[in-house]
Image: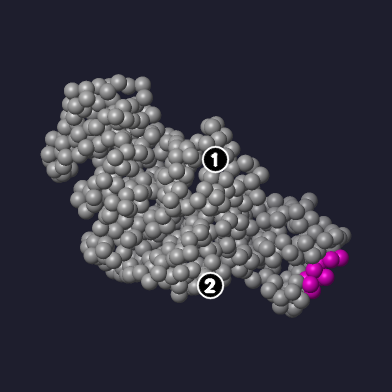
Amino acid sequence: MFHENDLELYSSAITLSDMECFVFPELMYSLVLANLMSPAVWQWRNEDCFVKLEGKNPYRKLMRLRQYIMDEFDFNLDLQTWGLTTKQAELARFGKFLSPEQIAQSNALFGYQGDQYYFDVDIRRHFGLDQYDGDVIPYWKTETVEAMNAFRRKPGYKTGAGECVSLSALYAAAAFIVAGVPLEDIFMVLTPLHSQNFIDVADGVISNNRRMVTKAMWFNGTEISTKAQRAIRNEQVTIVGHSTGWVHCLYDRATIDPSQYGRLRKKLGEFLTAELNVLNFANFLRADHVYQKYFQFCRIIRDKKMFVKAEILFGYEHGSRFRVAEETCEKLLDEVSSEDYQQFPHEGRICCEQLRAYLEYEKISIEKPGDRYKLARFLAPAMPDAEKLVADLVDFLKITPKLPGEQKQYEKTEPLIISSDWSRQQITDYLRSMRDKSLTADLAFYANRDMDACDWRPFLKAAMERSPVSVEAAKDKNERQVFAWLNEMSNESIYDGSRLAQPDEVVNYTTGDGVEKAITLANILCVRRPDKTIEIRIAGRDIVVIDSADSAEYRFASNKTFTKKLRLSRRQE
Protein backbone atom coordinates (compact mmCIF):
# COMPACT_ATOMS: atom_id res chain seq x y z
CA MET A 1 0.00 0.00 0.00
CA PHE A 2 0.89 3.68 -0.06
CA HIS A 3 4.10 4.91 1.57
CA GLU A 4 4.81 8.54 2.46
CA ASN A 5 7.99 8.56 0.35
CA ASP A 6 5.90 7.72 -2.72
CA LEU A 7 3.53 10.68 -2.39
CA GLU A 8 4.69 12.25 -5.68
CA LEU A 9 4.17 9.00 -7.56
CA TYR A 10 0.78 8.21 -6.07
CA SER A 11 -0.55 11.73 -6.50
CA SER A 12 0.59 11.55 -10.13
CA ALA A 13 -1.68 8.53 -10.56
CA ILE A 14 -4.55 10.91 -9.83
CA THR A 15 -3.68 13.65 -12.33
CA LEU A 16 -1.85 11.55 -14.95
CA SER A 17 -0.30 14.43 -16.85
CA ASP A 18 1.93 13.66 -19.82
CA MET A 19 4.92 14.76 -17.76
CA GLU A 20 3.97 12.47 -14.87
CA CYS A 21 3.56 9.47 -17.17
CA PHE A 22 6.94 10.26 -18.72
CA VAL A 23 8.70 10.27 -15.33
CA PHE A 24 6.74 7.38 -13.83
CA PRO A 25 6.25 4.76 -16.58
CA GLU A 26 4.11 2.54 -14.31
CA LEU A 27 1.30 5.07 -14.63
CA MET A 28 0.35 4.35 -18.23
CA TYR A 29 -0.74 0.80 -17.59
CA SER A 30 -2.37 1.76 -14.30
CA LEU A 31 -4.81 3.87 -16.33
CA VAL A 32 -5.59 0.90 -18.58
CA LEU A 33 -6.37 -1.16 -15.48
CA ALA A 34 -8.49 1.67 -14.06
CA ASN A 35 -10.54 1.63 -17.27
CA LEU A 36 -10.88 -2.15 -16.93
CA MET A 37 -12.39 -1.65 -13.46
CA SER A 38 -14.74 1.10 -14.63
CA PRO A 39 -18.29 0.15 -15.64
CA ALA A 40 -18.23 2.64 -18.54
CA VAL A 41 -16.48 0.51 -21.17
CA TRP A 42 -18.24 -2.66 -20.05
CA GLN A 43 -21.54 -1.01 -21.01
CA TRP A 44 -20.38 -0.94 -24.63
CA ARG A 45 -20.83 -4.69 -24.76
CA ASN A 46 -24.60 -4.09 -24.71
CA GLU A 47 -24.54 -1.87 -27.80
CA ASP A 48 -26.33 -3.51 -30.76
CA CYS A 49 -23.28 -3.15 -32.99
CA PHE A 50 -21.25 -5.34 -30.61
CA VAL A 51 -24.05 -7.75 -29.65
CA LYS A 52 -24.34 -8.63 -33.34
CA LEU A 53 -20.66 -9.61 -33.38
CA GLU A 54 -20.87 -12.17 -30.58
CA GLY A 55 -18.93 -15.24 -31.63
CA LYS A 56 -16.87 -13.33 -34.22
CA ASN A 57 -13.09 -13.21 -34.03
CA PRO A 58 -11.24 -10.41 -32.20
CA TYR A 59 -10.01 -8.83 -35.46
CA ARG A 60 -13.57 -8.38 -36.73
CA LYS A 61 -14.61 -6.84 -33.42
CA LEU A 62 -11.59 -4.52 -33.45
CA MET A 63 -12.61 -3.12 -36.82
CA ARG A 64 -16.08 -2.36 -35.48
CA LEU A 65 -14.57 -0.89 -32.32
CA ARG A 66 -12.57 1.49 -34.51
CA GLN A 67 -15.75 2.98 -35.99
CA TYR A 68 -17.44 3.13 -32.59
CA ILE A 69 -14.61 5.15 -31.05
CA MET A 70 -14.43 7.43 -34.10
CA ASP A 71 -18.16 8.12 -33.68
CA GLU A 72 -18.09 8.58 -29.92
CA PHE A 73 -14.85 10.51 -29.23
CA ASP A 74 -13.01 13.50 -30.64
CA PHE A 75 -9.29 14.08 -30.35
CA ASN A 76 -8.72 17.00 -28.00
CA LEU A 77 -5.50 18.90 -27.35
CA ASP A 78 -6.94 22.20 -26.18
CA LEU A 79 -4.44 24.07 -24.01
CA GLN A 80 -7.19 25.44 -21.78
CA THR A 81 -8.81 22.12 -20.83
CA TRP A 82 -6.50 21.28 -17.92
CA GLY A 83 -4.77 24.60 -17.45
CA LEU A 84 -1.16 25.73 -17.45
CA THR A 85 1.97 25.30 -15.40
CA THR A 86 5.60 26.32 -15.96
CA LYS A 87 8.74 24.47 -16.98
CA GLN A 88 10.47 25.76 -13.84
CA ALA A 89 7.78 24.33 -11.54
CA GLU A 90 7.76 20.93 -13.27
CA LEU A 91 11.56 20.64 -13.41
CA ALA A 92 11.76 21.46 -9.70
CA ARG A 93 9.10 18.88 -8.96
CA PHE A 94 10.76 16.06 -10.91
CA GLY A 95 14.42 17.02 -10.43
CA LYS A 96 15.08 14.14 -8.04
CA PHE A 97 13.89 11.63 -10.64
CA LEU A 98 15.39 12.95 -13.91
CA SER A 99 17.81 15.73 -14.81
CA PRO A 100 16.61 18.73 -16.87
CA GLU A 101 18.87 17.56 -19.71
CA GLN A 102 17.28 14.11 -19.78
CA ILE A 103 13.80 15.60 -19.74
CA ALA A 104 14.65 18.03 -22.56
CA GLN A 105 15.97 15.19 -24.74
CA SER A 106 12.74 13.24 -24.72
CA ASN A 107 9.84 15.45 -23.69
CA ALA A 108 7.97 17.64 -26.16
CA LEU A 109 7.40 20.45 -23.66
CA PHE A 110 11.01 20.83 -22.50
CA GLY A 111 13.08 21.34 -25.62
CA TYR A 112 12.52 18.17 -27.63
CA GLN A 113 11.84 19.13 -31.25
CA GLY A 114 10.57 15.82 -32.60
CA ASP A 115 10.80 14.93 -36.25
CA GLN A 116 11.68 17.40 -39.00
CA TYR A 117 8.03 18.33 -39.50
CA TYR A 118 7.65 19.63 -35.95
CA PHE A 119 11.06 21.27 -36.11
CA ASP A 120 10.03 23.12 -39.26
CA VAL A 121 6.74 24.44 -37.90
CA ASP A 122 8.22 25.32 -34.47
CA ILE A 123 6.77 23.02 -31.88
CA ARG A 124 5.51 25.80 -29.57
CA ARG A 125 3.57 27.40 -32.40
CA HIS A 126 2.29 24.00 -33.56
CA PHE A 127 0.70 23.37 -30.16
CA GLY A 128 -0.41 26.99 -29.67
CA LEU A 129 2.10 27.67 -26.91
CA ASP A 130 3.50 30.75 -28.66
CA GLN A 131 0.64 32.79 -27.16
CA TYR A 132 2.25 32.34 -23.73
CA ASP A 133 5.57 33.21 -22.14
CA GLY A 134 8.32 30.77 -23.14
CA ASP A 135 8.30 29.14 -19.69
CA VAL A 136 4.58 28.34 -19.76
CA ILE A 137 3.45 24.80 -20.65
CA PRO A 138 0.09 22.98 -20.46
CA TYR A 139 -0.71 20.21 -18.00
CA TRP A 140 -2.16 17.93 -20.69
CA LYS A 141 -3.67 15.55 -18.18
CA THR A 142 -4.59 12.08 -19.35
CA GLU A 143 -8.29 11.42 -18.92
CA THR A 144 -10.06 8.40 -17.48
CA VAL A 145 -12.92 7.05 -19.60
CA GLU A 146 -15.38 8.92 -17.32
CA ALA A 147 -13.60 12.22 -17.93
CA MET A 148 -13.53 11.48 -21.67
CA ASN A 149 -17.27 10.81 -21.69
CA ALA A 150 -17.94 13.98 -19.67
CA PHE A 151 -16.63 16.21 -22.48
CA ARG A 152 -20.19 16.01 -23.80
CA ARG A 153 -21.08 18.47 -21.03
CA LYS A 154 -18.63 21.09 -22.31
CA PRO A 155 -19.73 23.78 -24.79
CA GLY A 156 -18.66 22.96 -28.32
CA TYR A 157 -18.49 19.19 -27.80
CA LYS A 158 -21.15 16.84 -29.16
CA THR A 159 -19.24 13.67 -28.24
CA GLY A 160 -16.69 12.53 -25.71
CA ALA A 161 -13.05 13.52 -26.21
CA GLY A 162 -9.53 12.95 -25.00
CA GLU A 163 -5.89 13.49 -25.83
CA CYS A 164 -3.76 10.81 -27.51
CA VAL A 165 -2.59 9.08 -24.32
CA SER A 166 -6.18 8.89 -23.06
CA LEU A 167 -7.31 7.38 -26.35
CA SER A 168 -4.44 4.91 -26.24
CA ALA A 169 -5.42 3.70 -22.77
CA LEU A 170 -9.09 3.57 -23.77
CA TYR A 171 -8.31 1.53 -26.89
CA ALA A 172 -6.24 -0.95 -24.86
CA ALA A 173 -9.04 -1.48 -22.33
CA ALA A 174 -11.77 -1.63 -25.00
CA ALA A 175 -9.79 -4.08 -27.15
CA PHE A 176 -9.77 -6.42 -24.16
CA ILE A 177 -13.32 -5.85 -22.89
CA VAL A 178 -15.23 -5.52 -26.16
CA ALA A 179 -13.06 -7.31 -28.74
CA GLY A 180 -11.72 -10.04 -26.46
CA VAL A 181 -8.06 -9.40 -27.29
CA PRO A 182 -5.84 -10.87 -24.53
CA LEU A 183 -3.95 -8.19 -22.60
CA GLU A 184 -0.62 -9.90 -23.35
CA ASP A 185 -1.25 -9.15 -27.05
CA ILE A 186 -1.55 -5.38 -26.46
CA PHE A 187 1.56 -3.20 -26.26
CA MET A 188 1.43 0.53 -25.48
CA VAL A 189 4.00 2.45 -27.53
CA LEU A 190 4.61 6.06 -26.45
CA THR A 191 6.80 8.68 -28.15
CA PRO A 192 7.40 12.23 -26.89
CA LEU A 193 4.68 13.59 -29.17
CA HIS A 194 2.26 10.71 -29.53
CA SER A 195 0.84 7.52 -28.07
CA GLN A 196 -0.39 4.43 -29.83
CA ASN A 197 -0.86 0.70 -29.27
CA PHE A 198 0.43 -2.26 -31.23
CA ILE A 199 -2.11 -5.07 -31.07
CA ASP A 200 -0.83 -8.49 -32.08
CA VAL A 201 -3.80 -9.87 -34.03
CA ALA A 202 -3.70 -11.06 -37.66
CA ASP A 203 -0.89 -9.10 -39.37
CA GLY A 204 -0.97 -6.56 -36.54
CA VAL A 205 -3.02 -3.44 -35.86
CA ILE A 206 -1.89 -0.04 -34.59
CA SER A 207 -4.40 2.14 -32.74
CA ASN A 208 -3.67 5.76 -33.48
CA ASN A 209 -5.72 8.49 -31.77
CA ARG A 210 -9.29 7.50 -32.70
CA ARG A 211 -8.31 5.21 -35.57
CA MET A 212 -7.01 1.70 -36.01
CA VAL A 213 -4.54 1.09 -38.80
CA THR A 214 -4.04 -2.32 -40.37
CA LYS A 215 -0.85 -3.24 -42.21
CA ALA A 216 -2.55 -2.68 -45.58
CA MET A 217 -3.72 0.76 -44.45
CA TRP A 218 -0.29 1.58 -43.00
CA PHE A 219 1.33 1.22 -46.43
CA ASN A 220 -1.45 2.59 -48.68
CA GLY A 221 0.36 5.90 -49.19
CA THR A 222 -2.55 8.16 -48.28
CA GLU A 223 -2.13 11.38 -46.33
CA ILE A 224 -3.90 9.85 -43.31
CA SER A 225 -1.47 6.91 -43.29
CA THR A 226 1.52 9.22 -43.66
CA LYS A 227 0.36 11.14 -40.59
CA ALA A 228 -0.25 7.90 -38.71
CA GLN A 229 3.33 6.82 -39.44
CA ARG A 230 4.96 10.06 -38.36
CA ALA A 231 5.65 9.28 -34.71
CA ILE A 232 6.98 5.73 -35.13
CA ARG A 233 8.88 6.63 -38.30
CA ASN A 234 10.69 9.64 -36.85
CA GLU A 235 10.64 9.66 -33.06
CA GLN A 236 12.38 7.81 -30.28
CA VAL A 237 9.92 5.55 -28.48
CA THR A 238 10.00 6.69 -24.86
CA ILE A 239 7.98 3.98 -23.12
CA VAL A 240 6.60 0.57 -23.96
CA GLY A 241 3.89 -0.57 -21.55
CA HIS A 242 2.56 -4.12 -21.23
CA SER A 243 0.71 -6.36 -18.80
CA THR A 244 4.10 -7.72 -17.69
CA GLY A 245 5.69 -4.31 -17.09
CA TRP A 246 7.41 -1.44 -18.89
CA VAL A 247 10.65 -0.34 -20.53
CA HIS A 248 11.78 3.31 -20.74
CA CYS A 249 14.39 4.81 -23.06
CA LEU A 250 16.09 6.73 -20.22
CA TYR A 251 16.01 4.19 -17.39
CA ASP A 252 18.51 1.33 -17.06
CA ARG A 253 15.97 -0.78 -15.20
CA ALA A 254 12.90 -2.29 -16.82
CA THR A 255 10.08 -4.49 -15.53
CA ILE A 256 8.66 -5.87 -18.79
CA ASP A 257 9.13 -9.57 -19.44
CA PRO A 258 12.15 -9.57 -21.82
CA SER A 259 10.61 -12.35 -23.91
CA GLN A 260 7.47 -10.24 -24.40
CA TYR A 261 9.59 -7.23 -25.32
CA GLY A 262 11.42 -9.41 -27.82
CA ARG A 263 8.06 -10.45 -29.27
CA LEU A 264 7.06 -6.81 -29.72
CA ARG A 265 10.33 -5.98 -31.45
CA LYS A 266 9.86 -8.89 -33.86
CA LYS A 267 6.15 -8.43 -34.54
CA LEU A 268 6.31 -4.65 -34.86
CA GLY A 269 9.29 -4.97 -37.19
CA GLU A 270 7.30 -7.33 -39.40
CA PHE A 271 4.30 -4.97 -39.36
CA LEU A 272 6.50 -2.05 -40.42
CA THR A 273 7.99 -3.92 -43.39
CA ALA A 274 6.13 -4.47 -46.68
CA GLU A 275 7.15 -6.55 -49.67
CA LEU A 276 7.95 -4.92 -52.98
CA ASN A 277 5.19 -5.53 -55.52
CA VAL A 278 3.33 -3.35 -57.98
CA LEU A 279 0.60 -2.54 -55.42
CA ASN A 280 3.10 -1.23 -52.88
CA PHE A 281 5.04 0.56 -55.61
CA ALA A 282 1.80 2.35 -56.53
CA ASN A 283 1.28 3.16 -52.84
CA PHE A 284 4.78 4.62 -52.79
CA LEU A 285 3.97 6.81 -55.81
CA ARG A 286 0.77 7.94 -54.07
CA ALA A 287 2.76 9.00 -51.00
CA ASP A 288 5.78 10.47 -52.82
CA HIS A 289 4.03 11.98 -55.82
CA VAL A 290 7.15 13.77 -57.09
CA TYR A 291 8.02 10.47 -58.83
CA GLN A 292 4.68 10.06 -60.59
CA LYS A 293 5.94 12.00 -63.62
CA TYR A 294 8.21 9.08 -64.53
CA PHE A 295 5.41 6.50 -64.84
CA GLN A 296 2.35 5.72 -66.94
CA PHE A 297 -0.45 3.15 -67.01
CA CYS A 298 -1.68 1.17 -69.97
CA ARG A 299 -5.03 -0.48 -70.78
CA ILE A 300 -6.73 -2.07 -73.77
CA ILE A 301 -9.64 -0.08 -75.21
CA ARG A 302 -11.38 -1.65 -78.21
CA ASP A 303 -8.36 -3.82 -78.96
CA LYS A 304 -5.97 -0.85 -78.80
CA LYS A 305 -3.39 -0.04 -76.17
CA MET A 306 -4.06 3.35 -74.55
CA PHE A 307 -1.78 5.18 -72.15
CA VAL A 308 -2.46 7.60 -69.30
CA LYS A 309 0.06 9.51 -67.20
CA ALA A 310 0.42 8.29 -63.63
CA GLU A 311 -0.28 11.69 -62.07
CA ILE A 312 -3.53 11.95 -64.05
CA LEU A 313 -4.70 8.50 -62.93
CA PHE A 314 -3.83 9.25 -59.29
CA GLY A 315 -5.79 12.46 -59.64
CA TYR A 316 -8.88 10.46 -60.55
CA GLU A 317 -8.68 8.74 -57.16
CA HIS A 318 -9.98 11.92 -55.54
CA GLY A 319 -13.73 11.57 -55.32
CA SER A 320 -13.62 7.95 -56.52
CA ARG A 321 -14.14 4.71 -54.57
CA PHE A 322 -11.45 3.03 -56.67
CA ARG A 323 -7.67 3.03 -56.30
CA VAL A 324 -4.62 2.61 -58.50
CA ALA A 325 -3.11 -0.91 -58.63
CA GLU A 326 -5.80 -2.47 -56.43
CA GLU A 327 -8.47 -4.92 -57.59
CA THR A 328 -10.57 -1.88 -58.42
CA CYS A 329 -7.96 -0.34 -60.72
CA GLU A 330 -9.81 -1.41 -63.91
CA LYS A 331 -12.89 0.43 -62.68
CA LEU A 332 -10.77 3.50 -61.98
CA LEU A 333 -9.38 3.30 -65.52
CA ASP A 334 -12.99 3.20 -66.75
CA GLU A 335 -13.53 6.60 -65.15
CA VAL A 336 -10.66 8.23 -67.03
CA SER A 337 -11.84 10.59 -69.75
CA SER A 338 -10.90 9.68 -73.32
CA GLU A 339 -9.14 13.04 -73.53
CA ASP A 340 -6.65 11.87 -70.91
CA TYR A 341 -5.64 8.79 -72.90
CA GLN A 342 -3.28 8.69 -75.84
CA GLN A 343 -2.52 5.90 -78.28
CA PHE A 344 1.24 5.94 -77.92
CA PRO A 345 3.41 5.54 -74.84
CA HIS A 346 4.48 8.78 -73.20
CA GLU A 347 8.15 9.30 -73.91
CA GLY A 348 10.50 9.01 -70.94
CA ARG A 349 8.01 7.13 -68.76
CA ILE A 350 8.01 3.54 -67.53
CA CYS A 351 4.85 1.57 -68.08
CA CYS A 352 3.67 0.11 -64.77
CA GLU A 353 2.67 -3.12 -66.51
CA GLN A 354 6.31 -3.54 -67.55
CA LEU A 355 7.39 -2.79 -64.00
CA ARG A 356 5.01 -5.45 -62.68
CA ALA A 357 6.45 -8.05 -65.04
CA TYR A 358 10.00 -7.09 -64.09
CA LEU A 359 9.36 -7.30 -60.33
CA GLU A 360 7.63 -10.66 -60.64
CA TYR A 361 10.26 -12.16 -62.92
CA GLU A 362 13.31 -10.90 -61.02
CA LYS A 363 11.69 -11.39 -57.57
CA ILE A 364 13.27 -8.14 -56.38
CA SER A 365 13.80 -7.88 -52.62
CA ILE A 366 14.50 -4.52 -51.01
CA GLU A 367 16.50 -6.34 -48.31
CA LYS A 368 19.22 -7.27 -50.82
CA PRO A 369 21.70 -4.58 -51.95
CA GLY A 370 22.19 -6.38 -55.27
CA ASP A 371 18.46 -6.31 -55.99
CA ARG A 372 18.25 -2.64 -55.11
CA TYR A 373 21.08 -1.98 -57.59
CA LYS A 374 19.30 -3.99 -60.32
CA LEU A 375 16.05 -2.08 -59.77
CA ALA A 376 17.85 1.26 -60.04
CA ARG A 377 19.42 0.15 -63.34
CA PHE A 378 15.99 -0.86 -64.67
CA LEU A 379 14.53 2.55 -63.78
CA ALA A 380 17.54 4.66 -64.81
CA PRO A 381 16.56 5.21 -68.50
CA ALA A 382 13.40 7.05 -67.43
CA MET A 383 14.74 9.29 -64.68
CA PRO A 384 17.85 11.25 -63.69
CA ASP A 385 18.36 9.84 -60.19
CA ALA A 386 17.04 6.29 -59.99
CA GLU A 387 19.23 5.51 -56.96
CA LYS A 388 17.39 8.16 -54.92
CA LEU A 389 14.00 6.78 -55.92
CA VAL A 390 15.09 3.30 -54.82
CA ALA A 391 16.42 4.67 -51.52
CA ASP A 392 13.13 6.49 -50.92
CA LEU A 393 11.20 3.35 -51.88
CA VAL A 394 13.18 1.29 -49.36
CA ASP A 395 12.48 3.93 -46.71
CA PHE A 396 8.77 3.75 -47.54
CA LEU A 397 8.60 -0.05 -47.36
CA LYS A 398 10.72 -0.59 -44.25
CA ILE A 399 10.47 1.45 -41.06
CA THR A 400 12.87 0.69 -38.24
CA PRO A 401 11.27 1.86 -34.97
CA LYS A 402 13.53 3.57 -32.45
CA LEU A 403 12.55 1.39 -29.49
CA PRO A 404 14.27 1.55 -26.09
CA GLY A 405 17.36 -0.66 -26.08
CA GLU A 406 17.13 -4.29 -25.04
CA GLN A 407 20.19 -4.11 -22.76
CA LYS A 408 18.35 -3.28 -19.54
CA GLN A 409 18.44 -4.48 -15.96
CA TYR A 410 15.23 -6.50 -16.03
CA GLU A 411 13.56 -6.70 -12.64
CA LYS A 412 11.45 -9.78 -12.18
CA THR A 413 8.00 -8.60 -11.16
CA GLU A 414 4.68 -10.34 -10.70
CA PRO A 415 2.90 -10.29 -14.09
CA LEU A 416 -0.76 -9.33 -14.22
CA ILE A 417 -2.59 -12.32 -15.69
CA ILE A 418 -6.21 -11.40 -16.41
CA SER A 419 -8.46 -13.76 -18.33
CA SER A 420 -10.66 -12.34 -21.09
CA ASP A 421 -13.47 -14.53 -19.64
CA TRP A 422 -13.53 -12.65 -16.35
CA SER A 423 -16.23 -10.19 -15.33
CA ARG A 424 -15.47 -6.65 -14.23
CA GLN A 425 -15.90 -7.67 -10.60
CA GLN A 426 -13.54 -10.61 -10.98
CA ILE A 427 -10.91 -8.30 -12.50
CA THR A 428 -11.34 -5.79 -9.68
CA ASP A 429 -11.07 -8.50 -7.02
CA TYR A 430 -7.97 -9.92 -8.70
CA LEU A 431 -6.26 -6.53 -8.94
CA ARG A 432 -7.09 -5.87 -5.29
CA SER A 433 -5.39 -9.17 -4.38
CA MET A 434 -2.31 -8.09 -6.37
CA ARG A 435 -1.84 -4.65 -4.80
CA ASP A 436 0.96 -5.74 -2.46
CA LYS A 437 2.73 -7.62 -5.27
CA SER A 438 2.33 -5.20 -8.19
CA LEU A 439 2.94 -1.44 -8.02
CA THR A 440 0.99 -0.96 -11.24
CA ALA A 441 -2.04 -2.75 -9.77
CA ASP A 442 -1.82 -0.62 -6.63
CA LEU A 443 -1.59 2.60 -8.65
CA ALA A 444 -4.59 1.52 -10.72
CA PHE A 445 -6.90 2.08 -7.74
CA TYR A 446 -5.63 5.68 -7.50
CA ALA A 447 -6.08 6.23 -11.23
CA ASN A 448 -9.56 4.77 -10.75
CA ARG A 449 -10.19 7.32 -7.94
CA ASP A 450 -11.62 4.65 -5.66
CA MET A 451 -11.34 6.54 -2.39
CA ASP A 452 -12.66 3.67 -0.29
CA ALA A 453 -9.61 1.71 -1.43
CA CYS A 454 -7.01 4.50 -1.32
CA ASP A 455 -5.17 6.82 1.02
CA TRP A 456 -6.69 10.30 0.58
CA ARG A 457 -3.38 12.20 0.81
CA PRO A 458 -2.33 11.71 -2.85
CA PHE A 459 -5.79 12.76 -4.05
CA LEU A 460 -5.74 15.91 -1.92
CA LYS A 461 -2.16 16.76 -2.90
CA ALA A 462 -3.14 16.56 -6.57
CA ALA A 463 -6.28 18.62 -5.96
CA MET A 464 -4.45 21.38 -4.10
CA GLU A 465 -1.42 21.63 -6.37
CA ARG A 466 -2.64 20.85 -9.90
CA SER A 467 -6.08 22.38 -10.39
CA PRO A 468 -5.39 25.68 -12.18
CA VAL A 469 -8.61 25.61 -14.22
CA SER A 470 -10.83 25.80 -11.13
CA VAL A 471 -8.77 28.67 -9.73
CA GLU A 472 -8.83 30.59 -13.02
CA ALA A 473 -12.58 30.09 -13.49
CA ALA A 474 -13.26 31.57 -10.03
CA LYS A 475 -10.85 34.50 -10.18
CA ASP A 476 -13.56 37.18 -10.51
CA LYS A 477 -15.77 35.77 -7.74
CA ASN A 478 -15.56 36.38 -4.00
CA GLU A 479 -15.83 33.47 -1.58
CA ARG A 480 -19.62 33.60 -1.27
CA GLN A 481 -19.98 33.85 -5.04
CA VAL A 482 -17.71 30.85 -5.52
CA PHE A 483 -19.86 28.88 -3.07
CA ALA A 484 -23.06 29.91 -4.87
CA TRP A 485 -21.52 29.12 -8.26
CA LEU A 486 -20.59 25.60 -7.16
CA ASN A 487 -24.00 25.00 -5.60
CA GLU A 488 -25.71 26.02 -8.83
CA MET A 489 -23.99 23.18 -10.63
CA SER A 490 -25.57 19.75 -10.95
CA ASN A 491 -24.93 17.67 -7.85
CA GLU A 492 -23.95 14.57 -9.83
CA SER A 493 -20.42 13.16 -9.95
CA ILE A 494 -19.01 11.90 -13.24
CA TYR A 495 -17.71 8.92 -11.21
CA ASP A 496 -19.85 6.18 -9.71
CA GLY A 497 -19.79 4.87 -6.15
CA SER A 498 -16.88 5.87 -3.94
CA ARG A 499 -14.87 7.43 -6.76
CA LEU A 500 -14.17 11.17 -6.82
CA ALA A 501 -13.49 13.87 -9.43
CA GLN A 502 -10.71 16.41 -9.11
CA PRO A 503 -11.54 20.15 -8.87
CA ASP A 504 -10.70 20.81 -12.51
CA GLU A 505 -13.09 18.05 -13.59
CA VAL A 506 -15.86 19.59 -11.49
CA VAL A 507 -15.33 22.99 -13.13
CA ASN A 508 -14.74 21.71 -16.66
CA TYR A 509 -17.90 19.64 -16.69
CA THR A 510 -19.96 21.92 -14.37
CA THR A 511 -21.11 19.04 -12.21
CA GLY A 512 -19.97 17.40 -9.00
CA ASP A 513 -20.96 15.65 -5.84
CA GLY A 514 -20.92 17.69 -2.63
CA VAL A 515 -17.60 16.17 -1.54
CA GLU A 516 -16.03 17.16 -4.85
CA LYS A 517 -17.44 20.68 -4.65
CA ALA A 518 -16.16 21.05 -1.10
CA ILE A 519 -12.63 20.10 -2.14
CA THR A 520 -12.89 22.47 -5.12
CA LEU A 521 -13.91 25.34 -2.84
CA ALA A 522 -11.12 24.53 -0.40
CA ASN A 523 -8.55 24.57 -3.18
CA ILE A 524 -9.70 27.98 -4.44
CA LEU A 525 -9.67 29.45 -0.93
CA CYS A 526 -6.21 28.09 -0.15
CA VAL A 527 -4.70 29.34 -3.41
CA ARG A 528 -5.96 32.83 -2.58
CA ARG A 529 -4.55 32.62 0.94
CA PRO A 530 -1.69 30.08 1.16
CA ASP A 531 -1.58 30.56 4.92
CA LYS A 532 -5.15 29.25 5.27
CA THR A 533 -6.04 25.81 6.59
CA ILE A 534 -9.48 24.67 5.51
CA GLU A 535 -11.32 21.91 7.33
CA ILE A 536 -13.86 19.69 5.58
CA ARG A 537 -16.19 17.52 7.66
CA ILE A 538 -17.88 14.75 5.71
CA ALA A 539 -20.69 12.87 7.45
CA GLY A 540 -22.57 10.91 4.82
CA ARG A 541 -24.87 13.31 3.03
CA ASP A 542 -23.81 16.40 5.01
CA ILE A 543 -20.62 18.24 4.04
CA VAL A 544 -19.31 21.30 5.88
CA VAL A 545 -16.36 23.42 4.74
CA ILE A 546 -14.97 25.45 7.64
CA ASP A 547 -12.81 28.51 7.05
CA SER A 548 -11.90 29.34 10.66
CA ALA A 549 -9.69 32.28 9.60
CA ASP A 550 -12.76 34.09 8.25
CA SER A 551 -15.27 32.46 10.61
CA ALA A 552 -17.15 31.09 7.59
CA GLU A 553 -18.93 27.81 6.93
CA TYR A 554 -20.15 26.44 3.59
CA ARG A 555 -22.50 23.46 3.32
CA PHE A 556 -22.91 20.98 0.49
CA ALA A 557 -24.94 17.79 0.03
CA SER A 558 -23.38 14.49 -1.02
CA ASN A 559 -24.70 11.33 -2.62
CA LYS A 560 -21.56 9.47 -1.58
CA THR A 561 -21.27 7.66 1.76
CA PHE A 562 -17.97 8.92 3.18
CA THR A 563 -17.29 9.77 6.80
CA LYS A 564 -14.12 11.85 6.95
CA LYS A 565 -12.42 14.89 8.45
CA LEU A 566 -9.95 16.62 6.13
CA ARG A 567 -7.54 19.50 6.66
CA LEU A 568 -6.31 21.20 3.49
CA SER A 569 -3.57 23.77 3.14
CA ARG A 570 -1.11 25.02 0.51
CA ARG A 571 1.67 25.30 3.11
CA GLN A 572 4.60 22.96 2.73
CA GLU A 573 4.59 20.98 5.97
Q: Given the image, on which type of amino acid does mark 1 rest?
A: Phe
Work out whether 7 lies above or below 431.
Answer: above
Residue 20: give x, y in percent of width and height.
42, 49
Asked whether the residues under the numbered discs 1 and 2 touch, taking CB atoms below 8 Å apart as contact, a structural biologist would say: no
Residue shown at the point (65%, 53%) measured from the top left = 317
Residue shown at the point (78%, 62%) measured from the top left = 388
Work out whether 498 lies above or below 436.
Answer: above
- Nearer the observer, 261 or 491: 261
Quadrant of the rendered structure where residue 332 is? Answer: bottom right
Count of marks placed on residues: 2
First to last magenta residue range:
373-381
Residue 312: give x, y in percent of width and height.
74, 53
In this rendering, would 265 be left or right of 436? right
374 part of magenta stretch: yes
Of helix, strand and loop, which one carries label 1?
A: loop
Neighbor class of circle 1 (other Cα within 10 Å; few <14, some 14-19, many 20+) is some
Residue shown at the point (36%, 46%) measured from the top left = 15
Neighbor class of circle 2 (other Cα within 10 Å; few <14, some 14-19, many 20+) is few
135 part of magenta stretch: no
Residue 502: give x, y in percent of width and height.
31, 41
Residue for badge 1? 127
Q: Which mark is residue 266?
A: 2
Residue shown at the point (54%, 63%) measured from the top left = 403
- Nearer the observer, 146 or 549: 549
Residue 277: give x, y in percent of width and height.
68, 70
Q: Given the image, on which type of amino acid does mark 2 rest?
A: Lys
